[in-house]
Image (tube, grey):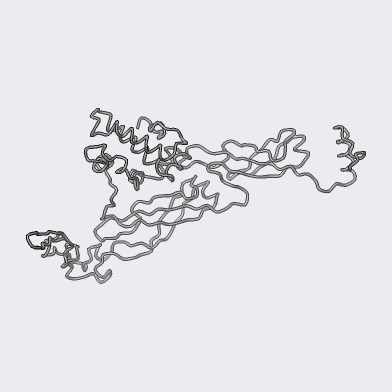
Amino acid sequence: MSNTDYYDILGISKNTDEKEIKKAYRKLALKYHPDRNKSKDAEEKFKEISTAYAVLSNPEKRKIYDQYGQAGIDGRFNQEDIFRNTDFSDILRGVGGMGGFGSIFDSFFGTSNSRDPSKGQDLRYDIDLTLEQAFKGEKMNITIPRNIKCESCTGSGAQKGTSPVNCSNCNGRGQVQVTRSAGFARFVSVQDCSNCQGRGKIIKKPCTKCNSIGLVEKKQTIELNIPSGVDEGSRIRLRGSGDFTSGTGQPGDLYIVTHMKSHDSFLRDNENLIYETNIDYPIAVLGGDISVPTLDKKAKLKIPTGTQNNTIFKLKGKGFPRINGFGTGDLLVRVNVNVPKKLNSKQRKLIEELSTEFGNNISKRKFF
Protein backbone atom coordinates (compact mmCIF):
# COMPACT_ATOMS: atom_id res chain seq x y z
CA MET A 1 0.00 0.00 0.00
CA SER A 2 1.13 3.52 -0.73
CA ASN A 3 -0.37 4.75 2.52
CA THR A 4 -0.59 2.51 5.58
CA ASP A 5 -2.11 5.06 7.96
CA TYR A 6 -5.64 3.72 8.23
CA TYR A 7 -7.03 6.98 9.58
CA ASP A 8 -5.59 8.93 6.66
CA ILE A 9 -6.89 6.35 4.20
CA LEU A 10 -10.45 6.89 5.44
CA GLY A 11 -9.92 10.64 5.91
CA ILE A 12 -10.84 10.61 9.61
CA SER A 13 -9.21 11.56 12.91
CA LYS A 14 -8.11 9.18 15.67
CA ASN A 15 -11.04 10.08 17.92
CA THR A 16 -13.70 9.37 15.26
CA ASP A 17 -16.52 7.15 16.57
CA GLU A 18 -17.75 3.91 15.00
CA LYS A 19 -20.74 5.56 13.28
CA GLU A 20 -18.57 8.12 11.52
CA ILE A 21 -16.03 5.45 10.51
CA LYS A 22 -18.80 3.51 8.79
CA LYS A 23 -20.06 6.69 7.11
CA ALA A 24 -16.57 7.58 5.84
CA TYR A 25 -16.02 4.08 4.47
CA ARG A 26 -19.34 3.98 2.62
CA LYS A 27 -18.61 7.36 1.00
CA LEU A 28 -15.25 6.11 -0.29
CA ALA A 29 -16.72 2.74 -1.33
CA LEU A 30 -19.24 4.57 -3.53
CA LYS A 31 -16.32 6.32 -5.18
CA TYR A 32 -13.88 3.45 -5.69
CA HIS A 33 -16.03 0.29 -5.94
CA PRO A 34 -14.80 -1.54 -9.11
CA ASP A 35 -18.38 -1.97 -10.33
CA ARG A 36 -18.70 1.82 -10.42
CA ASN A 37 -15.16 3.07 -11.00
CA LYS A 38 -13.30 1.57 -13.98
CA SER A 39 -10.02 3.47 -13.49
CA LYS A 40 -6.82 1.47 -13.10
CA ASP A 41 -6.17 2.42 -9.48
CA ALA A 42 -9.77 2.00 -8.25
CA GLU A 43 -9.36 -1.67 -7.39
CA GLU A 44 -6.21 -1.07 -5.30
CA LYS A 45 -7.82 1.90 -3.58
CA PHE A 46 -10.88 -0.18 -2.76
CA LYS A 47 -8.62 -2.78 -1.14
CA GLU A 48 -6.97 -0.05 0.95
CA ILE A 49 -10.16 1.47 2.29
CA SER A 50 -11.70 -1.95 2.97
CA THR A 51 -8.65 -3.07 4.94
CA ALA A 52 -8.63 0.20 6.89
CA TYR A 53 -12.32 -0.16 7.72
CA ALA A 54 -11.94 -3.81 8.79
CA VAL A 55 -9.27 -2.80 11.32
CA LEU A 56 -10.75 0.46 12.66
CA SER A 57 -14.32 -0.85 12.93
CA ASN A 58 -13.17 -3.64 15.25
CA PRO A 59 -12.47 -2.37 18.82
CA GLU A 60 -9.78 -4.98 19.54
CA LYS A 61 -7.90 -4.47 16.25
CA ARG A 62 -8.24 -0.69 16.52
CA LYS A 63 -6.71 -0.70 20.02
CA ILE A 64 -3.76 -2.76 18.79
CA TYR A 65 -3.31 -0.46 15.78
CA ASP A 66 -3.41 2.65 17.96
CA GLN A 67 -0.74 1.19 20.27
CA TYR A 68 1.61 -0.51 17.81
CA GLY A 69 0.69 0.77 14.37
CA GLN A 70 0.93 -1.36 11.24
CA ALA A 71 3.55 -3.62 12.86
CA GLY A 72 1.07 -4.66 15.54
CA ILE A 73 -1.55 -5.66 12.96
CA ASP A 74 0.92 -7.52 10.73
CA GLY A 75 2.39 -9.32 13.75
CA ARG A 76 -0.93 -10.66 15.02
CA PHE A 77 -3.32 -11.04 12.08
CA ASN A 78 -3.13 -12.44 8.61
CA GLN A 79 -5.37 -11.23 5.80
CA GLU A 80 -8.15 -13.64 6.67
CA ASP A 81 -8.05 -12.62 10.35
CA ILE A 82 -8.32 -8.92 9.49
CA PHE A 83 -11.61 -9.41 7.62
CA ARG A 84 -13.08 -12.08 9.89
CA ASN A 85 -16.42 -11.01 11.43
CA THR A 86 -16.45 -7.74 9.46
CA ASP A 87 -19.91 -7.25 7.95
CA PHE A 88 -19.69 -5.33 4.68
CA SER A 89 -23.07 -6.43 3.34
CA ASP A 90 -25.14 -3.80 5.15
CA ILE A 91 -22.76 -0.94 4.32
CA LEU A 92 -22.28 -1.89 0.68
CA ARG A 93 -25.87 -2.82 -0.10
CA GLY A 94 -26.61 -1.40 -3.53
CA VAL A 95 -23.07 -0.10 -4.06
CA GLY A 96 -21.83 -2.70 -6.54
CA GLY A 97 -23.45 -4.70 -9.27
CA MET A 98 -23.57 -7.76 -7.02
CA GLY A 99 -25.31 -5.77 -4.28
CA GLY A 100 -22.47 -6.14 -1.79
CA PHE A 101 -18.92 -7.27 -1.12
CA GLY A 102 -19.41 -10.99 -1.81
CA SER A 103 -17.40 -12.33 -4.70
CA ILE A 104 -15.34 -9.12 -4.90
CA PHE A 105 -13.98 -9.89 -1.44
CA ASP A 106 -13.09 -13.42 -2.54
CA SER A 107 -11.33 -12.35 -5.74
CA PHE A 108 -9.38 -9.53 -4.06
CA PHE A 109 -8.20 -11.32 -0.97
CA GLY A 110 -8.43 -15.01 -1.82
CA THR A 111 -10.68 -15.76 1.15
CA SER A 112 -14.26 -15.54 2.28
CA ASN A 113 -16.31 -15.19 5.43
CA SER A 114 -17.26 -18.85 5.34
CA ARG A 115 -14.91 -21.28 6.97
CA ASP A 116 -13.18 -23.86 4.81
CA PRO A 117 -15.04 -27.09 5.71
CA SER A 118 -11.91 -29.18 5.11
CA LYS A 119 -9.95 -27.19 7.68
CA GLY A 120 -9.86 -28.53 11.22
CA GLN A 121 -10.80 -26.89 14.47
CA ASP A 122 -8.68 -24.06 15.87
CA LEU A 123 -7.35 -24.53 19.39
CA ARG A 124 -6.52 -22.00 22.13
CA TYR A 125 -3.82 -22.29 24.77
CA ASP A 126 -3.54 -19.69 27.54
CA ILE A 127 -0.12 -19.11 29.05
CA ASP A 128 1.03 -17.03 32.04
CA LEU A 129 4.27 -15.09 31.66
CA THR A 130 6.43 -13.09 34.01
CA LEU A 131 7.34 -9.54 33.07
CA GLU A 132 10.92 -10.70 32.49
CA GLN A 133 9.81 -13.43 30.07
CA ALA A 134 7.69 -10.98 28.08
CA PHE A 135 10.55 -8.47 28.09
CA LYS A 136 13.25 -10.80 26.76
CA GLY A 137 11.13 -13.29 24.83
CA GLU A 138 10.99 -16.94 25.73
CA LYS A 139 11.45 -20.32 24.09
CA MET A 140 9.52 -23.11 25.73
CA ASN A 141 7.79 -26.39 25.06
CA ILE A 142 4.10 -26.90 25.72
CA THR A 143 2.18 -30.17 25.67
CA ILE A 144 -1.39 -30.18 24.39
CA PRO A 145 -3.90 -32.91 23.51
CA ARG A 146 -5.04 -32.67 19.90
CA ASN A 147 -6.73 -34.80 17.28
CA ILE A 148 -4.29 -35.95 14.61
CA LYS A 149 -4.45 -38.32 11.68
CA CYS A 150 -4.27 -41.97 12.64
CA GLU A 151 -0.76 -43.17 11.88
CA SER A 152 -1.96 -46.69 11.11
CA CYS A 153 -4.42 -45.77 8.34
CA THR A 154 -3.00 -42.28 7.54
CA GLY A 155 -6.45 -40.82 8.08
CA SER A 156 -8.39 -42.98 5.63
CA GLY A 157 -10.21 -44.96 8.34
CA ALA A 158 -9.52 -48.19 6.47
CA GLN A 159 -7.38 -51.02 7.78
CA LYS A 160 -3.71 -50.74 6.83
CA GLY A 161 -3.16 -52.17 3.35
CA THR A 162 -6.74 -51.44 2.23
CA SER A 163 -8.50 -48.34 0.95
CA PRO A 164 -12.06 -46.96 1.07
CA VAL A 165 -14.10 -47.44 -2.09
CA ASN A 166 -16.56 -45.08 -3.75
CA CYS A 167 -20.11 -45.39 -2.53
CA SER A 168 -22.22 -47.00 -5.27
CA ASN A 169 -25.34 -45.14 -4.13
CA CYS A 170 -23.94 -41.60 -4.63
CA ASN A 171 -20.97 -42.41 -6.89
CA GLY A 172 -18.57 -40.93 -4.38
CA ARG A 173 -20.27 -37.53 -4.18
CA GLY A 174 -21.61 -37.96 -0.64
CA GLN A 175 -24.95 -36.43 -1.61
CA VAL A 176 -28.01 -37.56 -3.52
CA GLN A 177 -30.98 -35.81 -5.07
CA VAL A 178 -34.38 -36.63 -3.65
CA THR A 179 -37.50 -35.87 -5.67
CA ARG A 180 -40.87 -35.46 -4.00
CA SER A 181 -44.18 -34.86 -5.75
CA ALA A 182 -47.13 -32.94 -4.29
CA GLY A 183 -50.06 -32.72 -6.70
CA PHE A 184 -48.86 -31.02 -9.86
CA ALA A 185 -45.72 -29.73 -8.17
CA ARG A 186 -42.45 -31.58 -7.92
CA PHE A 187 -39.78 -30.71 -5.32
CA VAL A 188 -36.11 -31.64 -5.70
CA SER A 189 -33.73 -31.49 -2.73
CA VAL A 190 -30.14 -32.54 -2.08
CA GLN A 191 -29.24 -34.44 1.07
CA ASP A 192 -26.43 -36.55 2.50
CA CYS A 193 -26.24 -40.06 1.20
CA SER A 194 -27.66 -42.45 3.80
CA ASN A 195 -25.49 -45.31 2.59
CA CYS A 196 -22.14 -43.60 3.30
CA GLN A 197 -23.38 -40.88 5.73
CA GLY A 198 -22.18 -38.18 3.36
CA ARG A 199 -18.59 -39.39 3.15
CA GLY A 200 -18.74 -40.58 -0.44
CA LYS A 201 -16.65 -43.59 0.57
CA ILE A 202 -17.41 -47.00 2.03
CA ILE A 203 -14.92 -48.60 4.41
CA LYS A 204 -15.14 -52.37 4.12
CA LYS A 205 -12.34 -53.12 6.58
CA PRO A 206 -12.28 -50.49 9.35
CA CYS A 207 -9.00 -49.49 10.98
CA THR A 208 -8.85 -51.02 14.46
CA LYS A 209 -6.63 -48.22 15.82
CA CYS A 210 -9.14 -45.40 15.22
CA ASN A 211 -12.39 -47.35 14.71
CA SER A 212 -12.58 -46.08 11.10
CA ILE A 213 -12.73 -42.42 12.20
CA GLY A 214 -9.29 -41.65 10.75
CA LEU A 215 -8.34 -39.60 13.81
CA VAL A 216 -6.82 -40.28 17.21
CA GLU A 217 -6.28 -38.01 20.20
CA LYS A 218 -2.66 -37.65 21.22
CA LYS A 219 -0.67 -35.40 23.51
CA GLN A 220 1.93 -33.54 21.51
CA THR A 221 4.82 -31.36 22.56
CA ILE A 222 5.08 -28.14 20.56
CA GLU A 223 8.02 -25.74 20.57
CA LEU A 224 6.84 -22.24 21.30
CA ASN A 225 8.74 -19.02 20.63
CA ILE A 226 7.32 -16.07 22.59
CA PRO A 227 8.53 -12.82 20.97
CA SER A 228 9.70 -9.98 23.19
CA GLY A 229 7.12 -7.28 23.78
CA VAL A 230 3.98 -9.40 24.17
CA ASP A 231 1.31 -7.99 26.44
CA GLU A 232 -1.84 -9.11 28.20
CA GLY A 233 -4.07 -10.78 25.61
CA SER A 234 -1.48 -10.98 22.83
CA ARG A 235 -2.18 -13.78 20.34
CA ILE A 236 0.44 -15.93 18.69
CA ARG A 237 -0.79 -18.05 15.80
CA LEU A 238 0.79 -21.43 15.06
CA ARG A 239 -0.49 -22.57 11.71
CA GLY A 240 -1.41 -26.23 11.38
CA SER A 241 -1.04 -27.00 15.10
CA GLY A 242 -4.75 -27.24 15.80
CA ASP A 243 -7.14 -30.17 15.53
CA PHE A 244 -7.88 -32.32 12.51
CA THR A 245 -11.63 -32.83 12.18
CA SER A 246 -11.32 -35.10 9.17
CA GLY A 247 -8.77 -37.71 8.23
CA THR A 248 -8.66 -36.26 4.73
CA GLY A 249 -8.71 -32.56 5.65
CA GLN A 250 -6.18 -30.05 6.96
CA PRO A 251 -5.50 -29.17 10.60
CA GLY A 252 -6.72 -25.97 12.21
CA ASP A 253 -4.45 -23.46 13.91
CA LEU A 254 -3.29 -23.10 17.50
CA TYR A 255 -3.65 -19.68 19.13
CA ILE A 256 -1.43 -18.91 22.10
CA VAL A 257 -2.97 -16.20 24.30
CA THR A 258 -0.57 -14.55 26.75
CA HIS A 259 -1.41 -13.33 30.25
CA MET A 260 0.90 -11.24 32.43
CA LYS A 261 1.76 -12.04 36.04
CA SER A 262 2.02 -9.13 38.46
CA HIS A 263 5.51 -7.88 39.34
CA ASP A 264 6.89 -6.86 42.72
CA SER A 265 8.72 -3.77 41.44
CA PHE A 266 7.25 -2.65 38.12
CA LEU A 267 3.90 -1.75 36.67
CA ARG A 268 3.45 -1.92 32.91
CA ASP A 269 1.57 0.67 30.88
CA ASN A 270 1.70 -0.52 27.27
CA GLU A 271 5.38 -0.06 26.30
CA ASN A 272 6.25 2.02 29.38
CA LEU A 273 7.36 0.71 32.78
CA ILE A 274 6.56 2.48 36.03
CA TYR A 275 8.85 2.20 39.04
CA GLU A 276 8.44 3.88 42.43
CA THR A 277 11.33 4.57 44.82
CA ASN A 278 12.15 6.57 47.95
CA ILE A 279 14.94 9.16 48.30
CA ASP A 280 16.28 10.73 51.46
CA TYR A 281 15.49 14.35 52.26
CA PRO A 282 19.09 15.61 51.80
CA ILE A 283 19.23 14.15 48.26
CA ALA A 284 15.92 15.82 47.41
CA VAL A 285 17.30 19.15 48.63
CA LEU A 286 20.90 18.96 47.44
CA GLY A 287 20.52 16.65 44.45
CA GLY A 288 22.59 13.58 43.62
CA ASP A 289 22.66 10.31 41.71
CA ILE A 290 20.67 7.20 42.60
CA SER A 291 20.61 3.71 41.11
CA VAL A 292 17.32 2.30 39.82
CA PRO A 293 16.62 -1.21 38.51
CA THR A 294 15.37 -1.98 35.01
CA LEU A 295 14.39 -5.30 33.45
CA ASP A 296 17.79 -5.36 31.77
CA LYS A 297 20.36 -3.90 34.19
CA LYS A 298 20.61 -1.08 36.71
CA ALA A 299 20.55 2.51 35.48
CA LYS A 300 21.71 5.80 36.98
CA LEU A 301 19.15 8.52 37.63
CA LYS A 302 20.24 12.09 38.32
CA ILE A 303 18.17 13.80 41.00
CA PRO A 304 18.29 17.59 40.53
CA THR A 305 18.49 20.08 43.40
CA GLY A 306 15.12 20.83 45.01
CA THR A 307 13.27 17.75 43.81
CA GLN A 308 9.72 17.67 45.15
CA ASN A 309 7.75 14.71 46.45
CA ASN A 310 6.02 12.56 43.77
CA THR A 311 8.17 13.94 40.96
CA ILE A 312 8.25 11.61 37.93
CA PHE A 313 11.47 11.21 35.93
CA LYS A 314 11.72 9.58 32.51
CA LEU A 315 14.55 7.25 31.52
CA LYS A 316 14.16 7.10 27.75
CA GLY A 317 14.40 3.71 26.11
CA LYS A 318 14.54 1.82 29.43
CA GLY A 319 10.98 0.54 29.22
CA PHE A 320 9.40 -2.35 27.34
CA PRO A 321 10.23 -3.35 23.76
CA ARG A 322 7.43 -2.90 21.27
CA ILE A 323 6.41 -6.17 19.71
CA ASN A 324 8.42 -7.21 16.64
CA GLY A 325 11.29 -4.91 17.64
CA PHE A 326 9.90 -1.52 16.57
CA GLY A 327 11.36 0.70 19.30
CA THR A 328 11.30 0.64 23.08
CA GLY A 329 9.22 2.47 25.67
CA ASP A 330 10.44 4.48 28.65
CA LEU A 331 10.97 3.83 32.36
CA LEU A 332 8.97 6.30 34.46
CA VAL A 333 10.44 6.68 37.95
CA ARG A 334 8.30 8.27 40.64
CA VAL A 335 10.31 9.45 43.67
CA ASN A 336 8.91 9.80 47.15
CA VAL A 337 10.87 12.02 49.56
CA ASN A 338 11.52 10.36 52.92
CA VAL A 339 10.81 12.79 55.77
CA PRO A 340 12.40 11.46 59.00
CA LYS A 341 9.88 10.68 61.73
CA LYS A 342 12.43 10.63 64.60
CA LEU A 343 15.39 12.93 65.19
CA ASN A 344 18.12 12.87 67.83
CA SER A 345 19.09 16.10 69.56
CA LYS A 346 21.94 16.87 67.17
CA GLN A 347 19.78 16.32 64.09
CA ARG A 348 17.00 18.42 65.55
CA LYS A 349 19.39 21.27 66.29
CA LEU A 350 20.69 21.19 62.72
CA ILE A 351 17.15 21.26 61.31
CA GLU A 352 16.28 24.20 63.60
CA GLU A 353 19.37 26.05 62.42
CA LEU A 354 18.38 25.37 58.81
CA SER A 355 14.86 26.60 59.52
CA THR A 356 16.25 29.79 61.08
CA GLU A 357 18.42 30.23 58.03
CA PHE A 358 15.24 30.15 55.92
CA GLY A 359 13.63 32.75 58.22
CA ASN A 360 11.54 30.34 60.27
CA ASN A 361 12.41 30.28 64.01
CA ILE A 362 10.65 27.10 65.05
CA SER A 363 11.71 27.31 68.74
CA LYS A 364 9.96 30.69 69.22
CA ARG A 365 6.86 29.97 67.13
CA LYS A 366 3.61 30.22 69.08
CA PHE A 367 0.45 28.28 68.21
CA PHE A 368 -3.14 29.11 69.11
Residue 50 falls left or right of residue 292? left
Residue 365 occupies which quadrant of the picture?
top right
Residue 293 coordinates in the image, percent (x, y): 63, 44
**Which quarter of the rendered picture does the C terminus lie within?**
top right
Q: Residue furthest right?
A: 364
Q: Residue at x 16, y 64 (%)?
A: 193
Could you say which is closer to the camera, residue 45 or residue 346? 45
**Which quarter of the rendered picture does the N terminus lie within?**
top left
Residue 24 coordinates in the image, percent (x, y): 37, 34
Q: How many marks?
A: 0
Residue 363 falls left or right of residue 238? right
Residue 115 coordinates in the image, percent (x, y): 29, 52
Residue 357 occupies which quadrant of the picture?
top right
Q: Residue furthest front?
A: 183
Q: Residue furthest left?
A: 184
Residue 127 falls left or right of residue 266? left
Q: Is residue 305 above or below residue 270?
A: above
Could you say which is closer to the camera, residue 176 or residue 348? 176
Residue 70 coordinates in the image, percent (x, y): 42, 37
